[in-house]
Amino acid sequence: MDSVTRRAFVRTAALGAATLGTGCASVPTLRVPSDQGLVHMSRGTVEPFSAAGKPFLVAPTGSTHPLIVVPNGGGGIRVFSSRCPHLGCQTAVSSARIVCPCHGSTFGLDGSVHRGPATAPLRENRVTETAGGYVIDLA
């Protein structure tokens, strides 16, 4: 499986929020292929966001909810489910926080609960760094 290139990201990010329809249009959304429960992304895809420290969304094929990708400042990324752990609603993401529009829970960009009713943090996906990028485990 090929990694997502910077060119592919730029080409699809502008349309991503409009076509995804999840209510998370405050940050760019990238539709990416998934293969056997894994998503491969190149470092070039993440670099524009790492430099600015800005989160973005990744919508894997076959998934009903996008993933929240947060650059960690050290060249790596953390990836979280966009589903609220309270009742599974789709969260909305901004450059500073994650909010559940259903019941008002708010989360930090580290997935931690800032305000309930959610009591558990956002589920974090396992990320493996490779020579050319990252592999995100969707399980």
Image: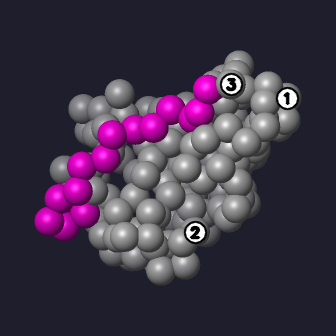
Q: Which residue is mark 1?
A: 103
Q: Give the quarter of the figure containing the C terminus.
A: top left
- In the rendered view, tell whether residue 29 sits above or below residue 137: below
Hey, what amino acid is under mark 1? Answer: His
Q: Is residue 1 left or right of residue 70?
A: left
Query: Which of pointers 2 and 3 indicates the residue nearer the eye?
Result: 3
The local secondary structure at tag 1 comes to loop
Q: Earlier in the sequence, mark 1 or mark 3?
A: 1
Spatial distance from mark 2 to mark 1, Cα to Cα?
25 Å
Packing grade of label 3 (10 A; few <14, some 14-19, many >=20) is: few
Q: Which residue is mark 3?
A: 119
Q: Are marks 1 and 3 in contact (CB under 8 Å)?
A: no
Q: Which residue is mark 2?
A: 54
Residue range of the region highlighted in magenta in the rendering = 120-133
Examine the rendering and report whether any part of residue 47 can be seen.
yes
The local secondary structure at tag 3 comes to loop
Q: Earlier in the sequence, mark 2 or mark 3?
A: 2
Q: Is residue 124 left or right of residue 122?
A: left
